[in-house]
Image: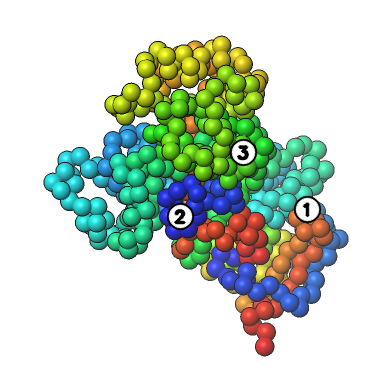
Amino acid sequence: MESMDTNSHTGGPVTARPVLEAPDIARVLTRIAHEIVERAKGADDVVLLGIPTRGVFLARRLAGKLEQITGRTVPVGSLDITMYRDDLRLRPARALARTEIPGDGIDGRLVVLVDDVLFSGRTIRAALDALGDIGRPRAVQLAVLVDRGHRELPIRADYVGKNLPTSLRETVKVLLSEEDGRDTVLLGVRETDQS
Amino acid sequence: MKHHLISAADLTRDDAVLILDTAEEMARVADRPIKKLPTLRGRTVVNLFYEDSTRTRISFEAAAKRLSADVINFSAKGSSVSKGESLKDTALTLEAMGADAVVIRHHASGAPYRLANSGWIDGSVVNAGDGTHEHPTQALLDAFTVRRRLVGRDAGMGRDLAGRRITIVGDVLHSRVARSNVLLLNTLGAQVTVVAPPTLVPIGVESWPCEVSYDLDAVLPKSDAVMMLRVQRERMNAAFFPTEREYARRYGLNGDRMARMPEHAVVMHPGPMNRGMEITAEVADSDRCTAVEQVANGVSIRMAVLYLLLGGNESAAAHTSRTDAVRTEETE
């Protein structure tokens, strides 16, 4: 979920070029996994929560890599932030996605939120609100595949796959094999801005 | 679903499935320590009840409060209505107070439709039971309960009730629950049979999308769910059946009859139950009876309806099927 306040659904990218291909995505996820282990000094109390839709797939992949590195199972869940969005009244009501908190909960754990694109920061603000209603983590960190800038809130990611300076006219689209059949990150230009 | 929820017939299959799926997510909130979402903060929901109905009112009240809406309960008794105020004047008062949604229960069939289509108020109108006409949220919570029991909680997501056989037993004539259920279950693809004494079958039932039978025992073995209706003693002023005992003997559900139902079949009741009349205590207290579950599911369904009507700048209208909504979400 790239942003809470763009109208990207009105015009998808027409000319889009890939900035990350499948091997790059696999490599950056491996790096993020190692960074998590290093910063958390192991991954004993880590819980990964993906933000639907693609954040959940990324969280599952990260969990797989963390298991390879540490040899222990890392709980994965999903956190739908739809009902915590600050732009609910600006658009038609939308369908909810799944929130799934691992059985042991998040109290006292290190929660790593996982999303595909970090943009305005409003999605993450909503996610922090949602977490507050579910439990009290020891700490919350943020991992994103792409940080495209243009923050509207004082939020930054702890783990970034790729920093991608963009203009507001550009769109960033993450495709993952679980949902889209292939892994790639596309940088395009809004249809409405093309003349 | 448009701006209002007046009749189960207003819902398309996609609307109905979207509501059931949304309710499934809302039900997860009920499992959490903090059963509250900020979604409808600053919105006002008025429960406008011209008829006493504690359980429906508190169900809507709990649903609205869990979504952080402000709730105003307006009971006709002891209000200006008893002094002769018209529905129109009450509506204008609510409009002036900025009601975003009005949940209305009225003894007159059609009152919610009038309220929604008169231009008196801008907010959404939700029918919480009008006369002997409809009670759409009850039908939705029944469908939700059936889907959970027969298809499964997670497996049911996105699914309808195609091919399920559902039997509605009892006072169909006076029951708004029966009418809404027949319409909605048919929309969801289920085969519905209503079973009642001939005197309690409404005129025009042949235009309903269901079969009619007078023989409960013949229908039970091929039912996936049996919905027992309450015998509304307060409406039994005419001689609809000879004695209560005879009704119980022919149309009441007891242990013997329940044993004739398929293994997986469930017994439903909208409550309050007349034990010993339409249902015996043995059946009411068995694992197969979903009456208590239906109450809990009612809150989830009403949360879903209020969220879908009020959660955006317009309702999740008929044009937005679940798939479209998800697609919009993903391209952001």
> For the point 83% across and 65% down, which residue is it?
A21
Q: Foreground: A2 or B317?
A: B317
Query: Can I make out residue B261 in this image?
Result: yes
Residue occupying the far right of the picture: A23
Label at residue B190: 3
| Badge 2: chain ID | B
Q: Foreground: A178 or B278?
A: B278
| Badge 1: chain ID | A
- Quadrant of the rendered structure where residue A71 is? top right
Label at residue B309: 2
Please identify, in this view, whether the residue under mark 3 or under mark 1 is nearer the observer. 3
Query: Can I make out residue A142 in this image?
Result: no
Could you tell me residue A1's position as x and y percent? 63, 61
Please identify, in this view, whether the residue under mark 2 or under mark 1 is nearer the observer. 2
Could you tell me residue B126's position as x and y percent? 40, 49
Q: How crowded is mark 1: few (under 14 residues within 10 Å), some or many (20 or more)?
A: few
Label at residue A178: 1
